[in-house]
Amino acid sequence: MNKPIGILLMAYGTPRSLDEVEAYYTHIRRGNKPSQALLDELIGRYKAIGGVSPLNEITDEQARRLEQTLNAKGSQYKVYIGMKHAEPFIADVVRRMADDGIAEAVGVVLAPHYSTMSVGVYTKEAQEAAKAVGLEMKCVSSWHMQDAFLDALEARLRDALERFSEDERRQLKVVFSAHSLPERILALGDPYPKQLLETSQALAERVQIRDWQFAWQSAGRTAEPWLGPDLLLVMDELAETGYHAMLSCPVGFVADHLEVLYDLDIEARQHASQKGIHFERTASLNADQRMIDALVAAIHEVEGESH
Ligand code: FEC
């Protein structure tokens, strides 16, 4: 029997309890412990979304469906989850894949758009660990224009638009967003902003949205400049120019997690209500089959197959 092909499904990771938040935050900050004030603030955000983020369960379900879909036609794939900031960490999982006898693998990140500071970090870690154990590892760099991904988002957009009255739809702004990154990525010619605009533009064309813009969200709490305009500032401008309806579509994220459940559903929604704006957000893709199909297509492209 042939050896299965390993799929390393890479995810951000989240603390499993409030006790783990400090270690998690320290890992995100590359080993620098956060101040007590920053830690308390982050714990407060987790508490506000119910204590823990549902991200791990969603990642598990995405992995289960991905393996099922990849193997539906009799192929043999084994999906492993590797996390960037929580256990099981990417490098440990790559070593486990090698111990299990996997010789060939494909890595794919649960973030559709490539940046050297996001997807590039995951894939570098995976490929370095793979090289060290003699495992052949190819990685998907981005999957932001996969048809099935756009299909899934298009359906979410159409559903969300129904939540506005006909009157509101006459002057409604659709705001696509993604996690901000430090502005210095621009000097490196990073493809992240361009890829995000490509996804947004494609969706706007499919749904025939004429009034849309792109904004950045969830910028880090550091001194250096981050990419803007920030979503909350965009909302201020909308209110000033007479808008009363805004549909948020966070195209850079695929699951319900802190940056969606807190930054959009709590913080942005509150801000909108203070500004007299009816705020809605497109539902997250989570384990939507079309998103899984997009991952499968991206994996097969990297394998050089014509599925
Ligand atoms: O639900 C959860 O518990 C996890 C939610 C979560 C996701 C996520 C995705 C991205 N991040 C990206 C970049 C950065 C940069 C910094 C940074 C900081 C944080 C902090 C938390 C956090 N991130 Fe995150 N991110 C999530 C959670 N992120 C918590 C720390 C507190 C804070 O700043 O809010 C800044 C690091 C530094 O301080 O030096 C940069 C990017 C993504 C989207 C791509 C991906 O998923 O990998 C980019 C989900």
Image (cartoon, grey):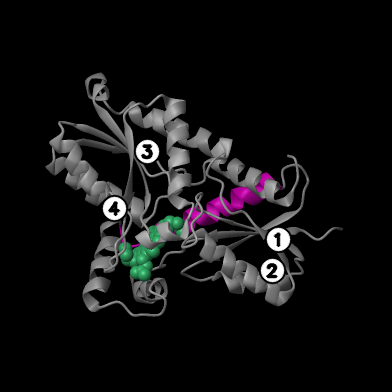
Residue 67 is a magenta residue: yes
Which disc, if any, is residue 19? Answer: none
**Can you identify the residue that label 1 sits on?**
105
**Can you identify the residue that label 3 sits on?**
282
Q: Amino acid at mark 2?
A: Met
What kind of element bears circle 2? helix
> Contact (CB < 8 A) between labels 2 and 1?
yes
Q: Quadrant of the C terminus?
A: top right
Q: Earlier in the sequence, mark 1 or mark 3?
A: 1
Tell me the quarter of the picture where residue 236 sits: top left
Q: Amino acid at mark 3?
A: Thr
**Can you identify the residue that label 2 sits on?**
97
Q: Residue at x 27, y 24 (%)?
A: 169
Q: Amino acid at mark 1?
A: Ala
Disc 1: CA contacts within 10 A as few (<14), some (14-19) or many (>=20): many
Residues in magenta? 50-70
Q: Quadrant of the N terminus?
A: bottom right
State whether residue 55 is above or below residue 244. Answer: below
| Ligand 1 visible in quadrant | bottom left
Which disc, if any, is residue 263? Answer: 4
Q: Residue furthest front?
A: 187
Q: Residue at x 28, y 68 (%)?
A: 222
State whether residue 269 is above or below residue 126. Answer: above
